[in-house]
Image (cartoon, rainbow, N blue to C red):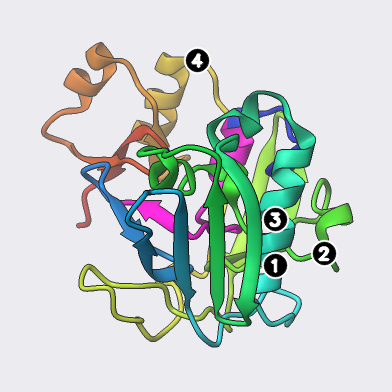
Amino acid sequence: DLDSVSGSDSATLAIGYQNLFEGLTRLDEHGAVQPNLATAWTAASDSLAISFTLAADVRYHDGTAFDAQHVVFSLKRLLAAGGERAAPYVAIADVAAPDAGTVKLTLSRPDDKLLYSLALPAAGMVAPESADTNATSPIGTGPFTFVSWTPNDSFKVTRNPHYWGGLDAQGKVMTGTPYLSSIEFKPITDDTTRASALQSGDIDMLSTISAQTANSLAGSYTEVRDWDAGSVFVQLKPG
């Protein structure tokens, strides 16, 4: 199940998030909250409401225009599902869309972790037009579109030619499409086997490795810390 709310495979959901789906906020390489589909926000003086300004000209992979009603739908859908995934959002008492580019969250109590929680996979934005089929054919606003998923074998995505661009470190909308034309993710559970696959060239990057394996690869590969996925990637150096 690839649905960000109902899916049970956390590793697969982590792959889909920020590749296929995006949230109102994101976490940078230092774990700090940054704008994403919400370009700015303002909290009420009593901390019981937050208003978000949404990025313009964003579309889902199927061409559906993203707007505030999709935020209302996505967050209410998440809260209605309940359970562990919804737990970080229980302070949200209401979600409203004053206009197409603005969302207002009313809270039952102040929650200083909410902006962080809105950057987690469960809070990825989905459209009501495609939500029912996201378990097998996920559609989001992210830089890559879904190609195929074979459980315990591979997860394939391809470049989204109509990607809105995302935001740079200064919060400005970037232009252009993703650098990579496609990505195939391979689940290899054994640490040693994954390291061997990297060294043989069968894979170009791996994640979530032990300190011992990371030390054995030091000098030949580059370590990159990606807070969004909560993982450590080791990437083959160019040349």
Is there a contact, CB below 8 Å, between mark 1 and mark 4?
Answer: no
In what element is the residue under mark 2?
loop
Q: Which mark is first along the chain, 2 or 3?
A: 3
Mark nearer the viewer, 2 or 4: 2
**Mark 4, residues whose alpha carbon is within 10 Å: few (<14), some, or many (≥20)?**
few
Residue position for label 3: 74
In what element is the residue under mark 4?
loop
Mark nearer the viewer, 1 or 4: 1
Is there a contact, CB below 8 Å, between mark 1 and mark 2?
Answer: yes
Residue position for label 1: 70
Q: x, y percentage for residue 175?
A: 38, 86
Residue position for label 2: 128
**Mark 3, residues whose alpha carbon is within 10 Å: few (<14), some, or many (≥20)?**
many
Say which amino acid is labelled 1. His
The magenta stretch is 11-27
In the picture as drawn, the residue positioned furthest to the top comes out as 212
